[in-house]
Amino acid sequence: DEYNRVLGGIVAAHASDMRFLVSPTLTRIEAQTAFFDKVYKTTQLLALLQEYRGGLLIENMEFVAFESLRGFARAHHIPCRFSYSYWCVQRLLRTLGFFRLKVFFLTFYQVFLGIVSMILLPWKEKPRENIILSFFDYRSQGAGGEYRDPYFQPLIEYLRVRGESVAIIVHLMRSSSPRAAIRAILNIRNMNRYADVVPAERLLSPLDMLRAGIHSLGAPLRISEPVLCLGLDISDMLNWSLREDLCLRNNWFMAFKCRLLSERIFRLPSLKRVIYPYENHPWEKMMVLRRNQIGSAVKLVGFQHTSFSLKLLNHFPSESERALPTFPDRILTTGRILKEEFLRNGKYPLGIIEEGCALRHGYL
């Protein structure tokens, strides 16, 4: 509770700065950052260092915790030995120069995907009542080669029975190589006989991808004031984790890419709602923020699509985040039990959590 309250308070206090709203560390995307574990373990190791009498060996140290302990040892004149080559490599991976190089290659790879998608896939801006945002990988192909959505297939079939038009916009997963990406795009082209499905890159222009990359370069974030949590000033650890958000994770590019994608989606004719898998990730918040800025009447529905651990704190916003404009109009849970967990542990705006049903894992 204290950890959630402290980081949630930082986000709420700087809500006018979009970087705080989409930071994986500050918004507790623990599956990516594991920052709570790092803070908790560091408090235990610091207690050992304070009782230091010599001969303490710490192995398999994660870099954020390592830097915190190294700084403590240096400040208290405690001798320590470590792999200098390991330290140099880890510092290099977290430099802005490395980050800019990474953004350069990521941007032009996305431009490449967009050009390939434009060549291979048709897309007409015809009226569509429902857009479903999903992810494309090996689970997306049925036994007969047809498209089968790994998150929303029963819902897609239900909407079709009701006579409502549905388009599925997918983000390509596990397509880090050009060959794998082209294969996925060709598969999607063949599946268009069965479903109106298109990769997100098809809706974005090369200029959009360049804009996303440029915005990403302006995302460095640093906390200057002390941050007290679990009896420890975690500001140094926090800043290292914020640096990792930038240099080691792709959240920033994905978030800005989805912001531009949202602009395209919300201007589609006759669109009523956008449905997406809800995990309260940065790209989802960017979409909600952009919808609000545009003033679109399109409804956003997040589907809490699978089970989760109570350690995945992104599902549980703090009290200070309740009023932030980053939540969809409705969040549907996979049943009553998970709805109760959301309401018990998360501070959501009143009335947006509703009980739904399980839709996933039909491909198993």
Image (cartoon, grey):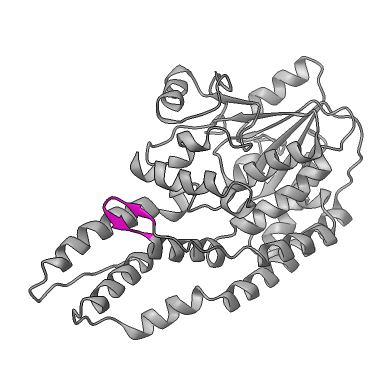
- Where residue 4 appears, as percent x and y from the top left, is 40, 42
The residue sitting at 56% across, 26% down in the picture is 349
Between 282 and 219, the one lying in front of the other is: 219
Instruction: Name the residue at 40% across, 30% down.
Output: 345
Give coordinates of residue 144: x percent, y percent.
70, 35
Compare residues 200 and 273 and report the one nearer the observer. Answer: 273
Q: Is residue 44 magenta?
A: no
Quadrant of res 170: top right
- Relative to 46, residue 154 above or below: above
Give me the residue at 72% from left, 55% from top: 183
Q: How many marks?
A: 0
Q: Can you see residue 316?
A: no
Residue 116 location in percent, x, y?
82, 59
- Above or below for 330 versus 200: above
* Residue 301 visible (yes or no): yes
Provide residue 286's location: percent of width, then percent of height.
Answer: 67, 45
Give the quadrant of the N terminus. top left
Residue at the left extreme of this rendering: 53
Nearest the camera: 334 or 161? 334
Residue 193 in the image: above or below residue 117:
above
Is residue 228 shown in magenta? yes
Task: From the viewer's perspective, tell me whether residue 231 is left or right of residue 211.
Answer: left
Residues drawn in magenta: 227-234
- In the figure, residue 268 lies in which quadrant? top right
Residue farthest bottom in this picture: 84
**Residue at the spot 63% in from the left edge and 48% down from the top edge:** 16
Tell which of 311 and 229 is nearer to you. 229
Task: Say left or right for 10 vs 227.
Answer: right
> Looking at the picture, does residue 179 appear above or below residue 56?
above
